[in-house]
Image (spheres, rainbow, N blue to C red):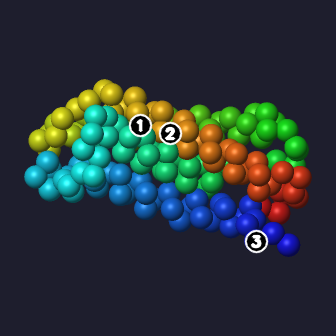
């Protein structure tokens, strides 16, 4: 008997996704005077933070929305989930874009490089989610999900 099942992974994704997304939005829209002191005070430290945050939210969304596959081929799992993969990427990067548009209204700067690192993190998070779903469901009876 497996401790980690496809159903428990999906539930973890459903629970974590809104919380991580809300935290990103909250921290991204804080006025500059209320920003937490940064432990990433080195060149491109904020870009690493963007990438990490968007990796986390994309990973959680991937766990929530991607479906497993009975096949032992990763390419089939990706093909079966291509619409969910694209929708997850577009949604999360769009959220990042909207945040970048709103930030100057709150006294923060708008940086296209932030959005690029958001997209890189989103891609990495989706990839990690695909690999976890593949590992958890490979060869399972996924109809029971």
Q: Which residue is mark 2?
A: 122
**Tag 3, which secondary structure?**
loop
Residues at circles 1 and 2 in contact by the CB criterion of under 8 Å: yes
> Disc 1 to disc 3, how far (Cα)?
32 Å
Q: CA distance from mark 3 to mark 2?
A: 27 Å
Quadrant of the frame with the N terminus: bottom right
* Above or below: residue 1 compared with residue 51: below
Tell me the number on the disc at residue 3: 3
Crowding at mark 3 (Cα within 10 Å: few <14, some 14-19, many 20+):
few
In the image, 105 versus 28, the foreground residue is 28
How would you rate the neighbour count of disc 2 (Cα within 10 Å): few for under 14, some for 14-19, many for 20 or more?
many
Viewer-closest of 32 and 45 = 45
How far separated are the C-alphas under marks 1 and 2? 6 Å
Camera sees residue 67: no
Q: Please report the residue visible at 27 percent of the width from the left and 39 percent of the height from the top.
A: 42
Q: Nearer the viewer, mark 3 or mark 2?
A: 3
Q: Earlier along the polypeptide chain: callout 1 or callout 3?
A: 3
């Amino acid at each position: 008997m497996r401790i980690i099942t496809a159903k428990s992974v999906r539930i973890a994704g459903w629970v974590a996704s809104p919380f991580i997304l809300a935290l990103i939005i909250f921290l991204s829209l804080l006025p500059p005077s209320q920003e937490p002191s940064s432990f990433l005070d080195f060149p491109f430290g904020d870009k690493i933070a963007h990438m990490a945050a968007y990796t986390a939210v994309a990973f959680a969304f991937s766990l929530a929305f991607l479906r497993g596959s009975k096949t032992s081929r990763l390419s089939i799992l990706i093909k079966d989930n291509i619409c969910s993969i694209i929708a997850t990427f577009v949604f999360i990067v769009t959220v990042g874009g909207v945040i970048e548009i709103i930030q100057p209204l709150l006294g923060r700067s708008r940086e296209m490089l932030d959005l690029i690192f958001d997209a890189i993190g989103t891609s990495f998070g989706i990839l990690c989610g695909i690999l976890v779903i593949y590992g958890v469901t490979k060869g399972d009876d996924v109809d029971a999900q």
